[in-house]
Image (tube, helix red, strand yellow):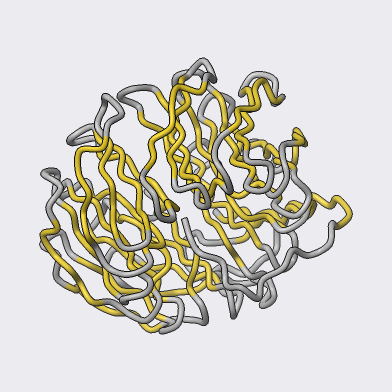
Amino acid sequence: MFVLPSFIVPAADTQANNSRLTSVPLVGPTNTIVANITKGSYPEALAYDPANSEMYIVNNGVGTVYAISSITDTIVANVTVGTWPYAIAYDAANKEMYVINSYSNTVSAISSSTNKVVATVPVGTYPQGIAYDPANQEMFVANYNSGTVTVITKGNFFTGTLNIGGRPFDLVFNPTNGEMYVDNTATVFAISRSNTIVANITVGGYCAAMAFNQANQEVYVVNSGSGTVSAISKTNTVVATIPVGSWPIAIAYNAANMEMYVANYNSNSTTAITKTNTIATTLTGEGGPMAMAYDPTTKSVYVGNFITGIDSVISKTNAVSTIAGVDKYSAPLAIAYDPANKQLYVANSGINSVYAIF
């Protein structure tokens, strides 16, 4: 999850144009734009559905979600959800996609089999974050303005609200201790499998994103306000506070080299952190790195740079390259990996399109 700069506004809707590209120059052994899927308004979030092998794109500006086929890279469904959809997550238990609608104060559940909304669940005010708990088979929603976390069962029933106060924004699940973590300005709350708050952990200022590190079983919290990353152990103790760049905003884990990568928006750089919580390197990149995702096929982390529109590739040896043929006005906001076709999808808010990269 990331925090949008205040100057960003949605662009207008565009004409449908699903184009398969065949002549884009190569940068490396793969890393080619093979499709440019243009439709919708302000694509902001992505998630893959393993039940139907489709990638889902959240169109923030028009209140819709598109399903893209892994086989053809074309839109196969256009699903109307609520107002200002912001984030999306997959529920493996009931095979449904959940979309939070920030202005409607609801969550839309989309069936994998029909690509239709099968439930609309009321939540708190201005929901911003969503994450799935596979242990309890429940979906957790962070409600920014009401200071609460809503819990939804696999049957799409509202099961309760946890009052934590403040401004809850992002969530991440720790499979080691079975707890859900929710950031809240300068603290992180740990929620147990019985849906009770078991820890209140002080971190840095203005938490923007979180991720789980499989190598050391720690949760990493990106603190935009303090320019640091906090590492939280499975016993809910901060074991390291790592200085990174200015206004860190996104984070991704590379399983190939067991390093955590942090995008520093104002510094135009990416910091790589080892499993022992030392800085491996800081890579100077393009303008405004904001979106990140790991590709297990290339064993690389992909970075979308919002200001310059360039998509960067960081290998497991921390060598940097770029994707050819990217529109400089693309303003990428999200990246996601599709294991069915081994492609990466990039949501370009500036040009209302989604790149498929192989």
Q: How many marks?
A: 0
Q: Position of residue 19 (x, y in %)?
A: 78, 53
Q: Is residue 297 visible?
A: no
Above-or-below relation of 154 to 322: above
Query: Which residue shows up at 33% across the image and 64% down it?
Result: 222
Q: Position of residue 23 (x, y in %)?
A: 70, 63
Q: Position of residue 220 (x, y in %)?
A: 26, 57
Above-or-below relation of 90 to 194: below
Pick out the residue farthest to the top.
155
> In this image, 33 relative to 262: left or right?
right
Q: Position of residue 288 (x, y in %)?
A: 51, 77
Query: Which residue shows up at 17% across the image and 64% down it?
Result: 274
Q: Nearer the viewer, residue 89 or 71?
A: 89
Query: Which residue shows up at 18% across the image and 35% down it?
Result: 177
Query: Which residue shows up at 75% across the image and 34% down it?
Result: 79
Q: Nearer the viewer, residue 63 or 287?
A: 63
Q: Quadrant of residue 117?
A: top right
Q: Nearer the viewer, residue 53 or 135?
A: 135
Q: Quadrant of residue 331?
A: bottom right
> In this image, 169 relative to 245: left or right?
right
> In this image, 243 relative to 168: left or right?
left
